């Protein structure tokens, strides 16, 4: 193997969703979401965030250790159900 293998949460989730798209990923009361459904939601949110200009502007290798080359966005889910595709969508938007 040449060098370290690099991966991120977005890539890992996408690979898992591709392998088991119809398996339940989240269950909350009567609501069920499969890995495939959550992956599509993540991609849709990430695409929207990119269209409004959020994302990675400078690759990590071009930054000092303390710098961030991406936009940062905080989400406060007031009275929201435990669907965390919004958080994964933010991570995916920053990795594209």
Image: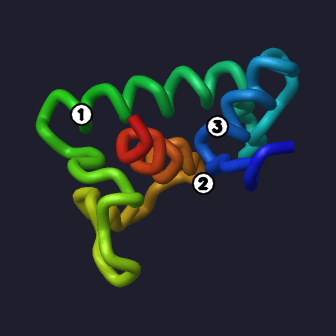
- Report x, y in % for residue 17: 75, 25
- Residue placed most toward the observer, 3 or 79: 3
Q: Work out which residue is located at the far front of the displayed protein and give it.
A: 2
Please say if the residues under marks 3 and 1 sit with CB atoms less than 8 Å apart. Answer: no
Please say if the residues under marks 1 and 2 sit with CB atoms less than 8 Å apart. Answer: no
Question: What separation in Å lies between label 3 and label 2 (alpha carbons)?
Answer: 21 Å
- Check disc 1 and report its element: helix, strand or loop: helix
**Residue hosting label 2:** 82
Q: Earlier in the sequence, mark 3 or mark 1?
A: 3
- Residue 34 in sight here: no
The residue under the point 43% across, 42% down is: 95
The residue under the point 46% across, 55% down is: 80
- Check disc 2 and report its element: helix, strand or loop: loop
Q: Earlier in the sequence, mark 3 or mark 2?
A: 3
- Check disc 3 and report its element: helix, strand or loop: helix
In the rendered structure, the answer to whether residue 60 lies left or right of residue 58 reads right
Question: What separation in Å lies between label 1 and label 2 (alpha carbons)?
Answer: 24 Å
Q: Nearer the viewer, mark 1 or mark 2?
A: 1
- Report x, y in % for residue 85: 53, 42
The type of colouring in the image is rainbow
In the rendered structure, the answer to whether residue 87 lies left or right of residue 73 reads right
Question: What separation in Å lies between label 3 and label 1 (alpha carbons)?
Answer: 17 Å
**Residue hosting label 1:** 50
The residue under the point 52% across, 47% down is: 88
Label placed on residue 11: 3
- Report x, y in % for residue 43: 46, 26
Q: Earlier in the sequence, mark 1 or mark 2?
A: 1
Image quadrant where residue 89 sits:
top left
- Report x, y in % for residue 81: 55, 52
């Amino acid at each position: 193997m040449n060098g370290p293998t690099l991966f991120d949460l977005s890539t890992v989730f996408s690979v898992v969703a591709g392998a088991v798209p119809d398996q339940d990923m989240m269950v909350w009361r009567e609501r069920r979401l499969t890995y495939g459904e959550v992956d599509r939601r993540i991609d849709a949110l990430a695409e929207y965030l990119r269209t409004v200009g959020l994302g990675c502007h400078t690759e990590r290798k071009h930054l000092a250790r303390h710098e961030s080359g991406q936009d940062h966005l905080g989400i406060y889910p007031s009275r929201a159900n435990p669907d965390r595709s919004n958080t994964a969508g933010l991570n995916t938007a920053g990795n594209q």
